Image: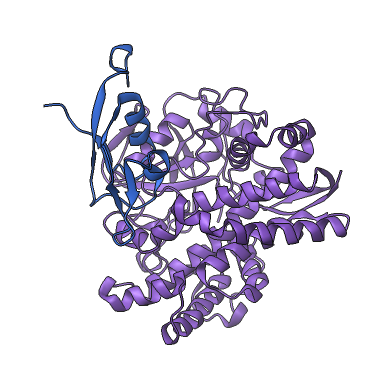
Chain colours: A purple, B blue
Amino acid sequence: MTIPETPIDITTPSLYLDGVPHDRLAAIRETPGLVWHPYEDVLSKGGGFWAVTRHEDIKEMSKRADVFSSAIGHSNLWDLEADALEARRSIIDSDAPDHTRLRRLVSKAFTPRNIRVWEGTTRQIAGDLLDEFIAAGGGDWVKMVAAPLPIRVILTILGVPIKDADFLVELSNFLVEGTGDAPSLPDDAYGNTTPLRLLPFGSPASHAMYQYAEKIGSDRKAEPQEDIVTQLVLAEENGDRLSEAEYRNFFHVLIFAGNETTRTAMTHAAMAFAENPDQWDRLVADPSLTANAVDEVIRWATPVLHMRRTAAEDTELAGTSIAKGDKVVMWYAAANRDPDVFEEPFSFDIGREDNPHFAFGGGGPHFCLGAFLARMEIQVLLEEMATRGLGLTMTQAPVHAPSNFVHGVLSVGMEPR
Amino acid sequence: MSTEADVNDTVRLTLDSEACIGVGQCELLEPTVFRIDDDENISVFVGERDLLRPRAEIVVDKCPSGAIQIAEET
């Protein structure tokens, strides 16, 4: 993939090695109308996308899901051939009515009411991890707390054995690499024989995830359990037409989005409180701020930096004409620092009462399925840290994922302060 | 957008069961009005569907699928 020189480049993955290039996003956000950002890949020479960076524009675009389609093109920046798009199609890459049908298959498990059921389990997992972290005198926060916590919770909800958590985190890390420009896996890793262009994020790790999905799916078909995997594989048999490809892509999304994003938020939470110890002291002194703190952590982290749509018809946004077929990309990372919406957007302030961030998307039908789960997990983490009086000091600088798509942190050293 | 004159207006909400994707935001905001039906996995009215306009606008705005709307006055 070659990227041409642009007036304001925001896609070269290495730009993200020191964190989100907010100065560049701000320059685009301050330009009236929409900015056309050149972007080339194998399939779209001389192409580009409309960069949507203002909060109000992303809000409008998210709600106009019939015009800004998730199904016509890829949800990532690069284009895919028709067969590749089809092979990896998931709830993320679909429009109503397909999207509605897929979403309703699992939506019940993720409503605020049903998420509360998992709070006790989450508290137990978080408490154990924090006790180990304290006993060890600190270490890599990602490895010790932020990665194991959400994967264990999502596996419990899905009905996947906890013993496979490390393996599924490993696959997720390779998938993140797949969004950058230097994937490290050989094409045939995990016994893969599928052409990479047919796999999500072009990664052999997706092949391994598919194989895992098929194995656990057939186990649950043989012996149904009270869990989501059973619900998904049996839905197919109830005539809900969940094809094998739909099932394995669904499983892929639930595992990847269900652990990588919340891990990122929990890592940025630790970094933000370590850099702003006054905010930590404020939270410990006044636990009633916890719910606000959770949303501030999520705004601050913005684990998914952007999502792409494709115009289904000629249209207009922010006074700019958009042609049918154009790529249009919502930069949530920019909207979440929009000074028209957030007072002092670059200060981490757990007291924000109105915090209409777009870390779960801009509010349309693709609103994050796991939003209430993520909030609950982060809330429990903060509460359990506060209970233990665990403030943090950074001992090793974060290593950021070289990705323009996820705000991933591979490791960061922390110790109790 | 509400104006000062209509903040005390009561408006009626409508629910499009084709569009609903069962997020549950409505039930979280107004548990006496909405509930995600345990069999259908979509939102249903469980109580009075009239709300003060400013509150109704928040509920409409927070519904990701656009299934909740304010009934057009006739």
Left/right placement of residue A223 relative to residue A189 reads: left
**Residue A141 location in percent, x, y?**
77, 54
Q: Residue furthest top?
A: B5
Res. A115 in view: yes
Tally of numbered tags: 0
* Residue A125 figure quarter: bottom right
Establish if A25 lies above or below A234: above
Residue A20's spot in the image, x, y percent? 64, 40
Near-viewer residue (A47 or A400): A400
Q: Quadrant of residue A280?
A: top right
Q: Tell me what residue is drawn at x 71 percent, y 35 percent.
A: A283
Placement of A70 over or under A161, stated as above or below: above
Residue at horizontal 63%, vertical 75%? A164
Q: Could one spot residue A13 in this view of the protein?
A: no
Residue in front for this viewpoint, B15 or A371: B15
Q: What is the quadrant of the N terminus of chain A in the image?
A: bottom right
Residue A389: give x, y in percent of width and height: 80, 44
Question: Which sits in the foreground, A200 or B45?
Answer: B45
Outermost residue, right direction? A137
Name the quadrant containing residue A240: bottom left
Quadrant location of the C terminus of chain A in the rendered image:
top right
Q: Nearer the viewer, residue A368 or A59?
A: A368
Q: Residue furthest left?
A: B74
Q: Above or below — where is B29 with respect to B9?
A: below
Please give left or right for residue A29 compared with residue B59 in the image.
Answer: right
Answer with left or right where residue B71 lies relative to residue A294: left
Point 51% across, 22% down: residue: A340
